[in-house]
Image: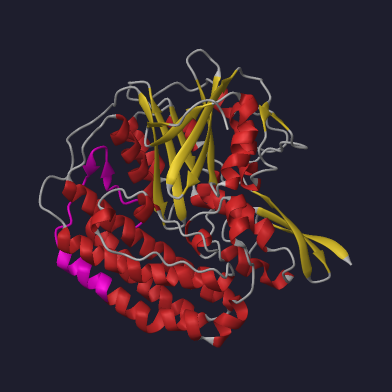
Amino acid sequence: MTSQEWRQRAGGNWMPANLGEIRSIAQSMLERGARFEAFVVTQTKAGELRLIWHWDLKGKLFSVESTAAVGTPLPSIVDIYCGSDWAEREARDYYGVTFEGRVSTAPLMLREADPPGVMLRSEGGPR
Amino acid sequence: MSYRIPLGPYHVALDEPYKIEVDCEGETITDAHIKVGFNFRGIEWLAQRKNITKCIALMERVCGICSNVHSMTFCMALEQIGAIEVPKRAQYIRMVVAELERLHSHLLWAGVAAEIVGFQTAFMEVFRFRERVMDLLEAITGNRVNYSMNCIGGVNRDITDPESVAAGAREIRDTVNRVLIPLFTTDRTISARCGGVGVLSQADAVRWGVVGPVARASGVDTDLRRDCAYLAYEEIAFAVPVRTEGDVLARVVVRAQEIVESCNIIEQALAQMPSGSLNAGDIYAVPPGDAVVRVEAPRGEVFYYVESDGSDVPSRVKVRTPTFANIPSVMAMVKGNEFADMPLIQAALDPCYSCTDR
């Protein structure tokens, strides 16, 4: 899949990857019978996005992480795992990310007219 | 003749607000389009603005049925980040409450399913069992919806009368074995209405990423309580019911058998529960780090990703609920089925749109 190796961390197996490797990793996961679990996006202190794709294989968690600047188009895996459709659409709602390789990324939680990027909004500090 | 039937977001036939548009060719469904987000509360956004103590209460409000599992999973993630040891007794108490919650959820669903099938007597009978479970939860926690049992490092309350809870579990198991299992496995009305309807193959179950009883009814032998044991599940003997038919009837039977297994787990847990403290004391922050915790909720795997920067406010809380994973597969299940089967196929997922939307 990639030149990187899986490492045990945070309750699962983790591997860093380039964005260009994500689709081949997803394809490999499907061939092994892994179930797509979740797509997690977080924002680092430097302002870039940390992207983590999670799979379950026989009860074990496999997580592939990458980073991208805000606004970078991400590879879609929806043609490999149809179950990732909602995860990608929610990422668009929360972080305003766009995906390459899918016809459109319609909002999931938001309405058509709502601006994406809910999680990037800074109003309302910690209480 | 082709036509599209819109249902929702607010409709008398829907338990919660969502929208489904069904494409039909005559009476046969050719496609379905689901729209959610009508209950969107921005809980993940809110979690980054509240301290972890307030977040426990916030997470408990992700779902009105499996409220306990959300606060418990959130606490487990923080405990993993902070390497906080949870006392053994607290782990057993968490397990008992989690299984009672599964009983409550599965019985609620069984009643709703019976009502949709048109079996009103079964609906009444099942809801009577469910009330017994609610009484047990109320006796342990003092609450019937948001139980407030979990804190970081353990639980807030003890189980002071384990024998009465065990007696309740025995009573429920006996009644389910005597009434519910035969009803769902041998009754001709149920099998005629549910058999061969809304089939999801094992391969599609993997491609759509379904979880919990929906996956197990499609031949995916998965259960985190066994495969990735947390709390004290590895000290308990229980079976994981799996069916291969992938239809509504298989989902019905899997859940009915899981009710019996949950009763067995509760009984064993109460018998084996060690003495000791309930929690690790007052904890208001954890060191920097992140954790992924997955728990087998009544509807399937709950997935939490929690990130801490060392302050008392989490820097990220990601919640993926079981229904979020299961609902899109309806689009695969309904194709080729009769339009009249649509409500049943949807109900067989035991969907919760509020927790999907968060």
Q: Is residue B62 visible?
A: no
Q: Is residue B152 magenta?
A: yes
Q: Is residue A64 visible?
A: yes
Lateral position of residue B237 relative to residue A18, left or right:
left
Lateral position of residue B217 relative to residue A114, left or right:
left
Lateral position of residue A64 relative to residue B257, left or right:
right
Quadrant (top left, top right, bottom left, bottom right) of the N terminus of chain A: top right
Lateral position of residue A63 relative to residue B88, left or right:
right
Task: Please determine whether, in this image, residue A64 is positioned above or below residue B126.
Answer: above
Q: Nearer the viewer, residue B232 or A61?
A: A61
x, y percent for residue B266: 26, 63
Quadrant (top left, top right, bottom left, bottom right) of the C terminus of chain A: top left
x, y percent for residue B179: 39, 83
Specify the farthest residue to the right.
B1
Task: Please determine whether, in this image, residue A112 is positioned above or below residue B184.
Answer: above
Specify the farthest residue to the front.
A3
Q: Residue at coordinates 33% horizontally, 45% vertically from top-left?
A: B72
Q: Residue at coordinates 23% horizontally, 43% vertically from top-left?
A: B154
x, y percent for residue B203: 61, 57
**Residue span colored magenta:** B143-170
Q: Nearer the viewer, residue B205 or A20?
A: A20
x, y percent for residue B129: 36, 74
Task: Please determine whether, in this image, residue B150 is positioned above or below residue B344.
Answer: above
